[in-house]
Image (spheres, grey):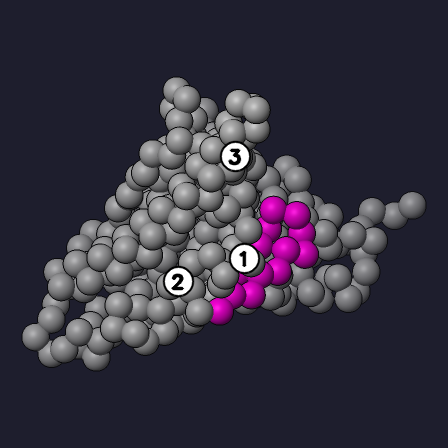
Amino acid sequence: MTEPQTHHTEHRITVNAPADVVFALIEDVTGWPETFPPCVHVDAERDGDRERIRIWATAGGEVKGWTSLRELDRERLRVRFRQEVSAPPVAAMGGEWVIETDPSGATLVRLLHDFRAIGDDPAKVEWIQQAVDRNSGQELAALRAAAELRTQRGELTLTFSDSLRVAGAAKDVYDFIDRADAWEQRLPHVARVSLAEDVPRQQVLEMDTRTADGSTHTTRSVRICFPHDRIVYKQLQTPVLMSAHTGEWLIREVGEETEITSTHTVVVNPEAIAGVLGAEAGVTEARTFIREALGRNSTATMGYAKAYAEEIADRAGHRAAH
């Protein structure tokens, strides 16, 4: 039986930023969801210059999850990667980030891939090729934007958390957050919801949310679920004031209680500030507005999750007493 053919691709871009800045963005794999549009979530375990990463990303309109091994070469500014566990239709994939300084003094980034398709099926090869081309182009453009705006990036990026204690079981709190398809009936600020879960624990959630002024905005998110303590997500369609939005619901037992924490990481879209908040507003006002709006909705959701879990606990206690 012949080995499936290995296909090779190369994509490149020139970045007007120092090579070490570009390398730092590539190295910071847990920050990729805020930098690269296709990337939804990354978990990483590092041992020196080697790391194992579990990554979820959109590819060809689908959510794919896989595990990769990475090796960082800081001296040569290279990062090699190889998928340890690939997602169909990919049989195997690897590659390398190569960062160089071109003659003009700018930074040249080359993104190399090699891959094989399951069964060497031409249709699968074409699907993978198109996904690699599309995602590589998006990733390189996003990498350039992040590197060239590095002085603004800290100001534009906002991370915050809110927490609530619950006198109920962690599993019941998790179930409330997991069952987003019921939020239209359970949460007053949710006007419409559509939830698809074609692959277990990988959800695509589209939702119309009411804002404080009575208007609604539509968001579309990918959620990755880790029963019964964590749900992470990335909005694929964000309100105009945000160029990126990722989040996490963390549910953990604390003694006999449960603590639920909602964390948001947002990248402000500076070009939209005047249109949304007025000509006098700046990044500070946008950060405050986003903090209050997102915090208000997630705190409300946690409050309803608390009531749901505590009602179940009360009923169980009542039955036990009788």
Please state which amino acid type lies under the numbered disc 1: Ala
The amino acid on which the numbered mark 2 sits, given as a three-letter code, is Pro
The one of 214 and 238 positioned closer to us in this rendering: 214
Task: Residue 18: tell me if it is visible.
Answer: no
Q: CA distance from mark 2 to mark 1?
A: 11 Å
What secondary structure prevails in the magenta region? strand
User: Which of the two marks, 1 or 3, is nearer to us in this view?
Assistant: 3
Q: Secondary structure at mark 2?
A: loop
Q: Earlier in the sequence, mark 2 or mark 1?
A: 1
Is residue 184 in view from this perspective? Answer: yes
* Other residues around mark 3 within 10 Å, as few (<14) / some (14–19) / many (≥20): few
Which residue is label 1 attached to? 182
Tell me the residue at 22%/57% (across/down): 292
Q: Tell me if residue 238 is in the magenta stretch.
A: no
Please, what is the three-letter code of the amino acid marked with disc 3?
Arg
Crowding at mark 1 (Cα within 10 Å: few <14, some 14-19, many 20+):
some
**Residue bearing the label numbered 2:** 188
**Residue 315 bears which disc, if any?**
3
| Quadrant in which the C terminus is drawn | top right
> What is the magenta range?
192-205
Q: Earlier in the sequence, mark 1 or mark 3?
A: 1
Residue 65 percent across, percent down from the top left: 60, 47
Measuring from the top left, give residue 8's x and y in whole percent.
64, 56
Q: Secondary structure at mark 3?
A: helix
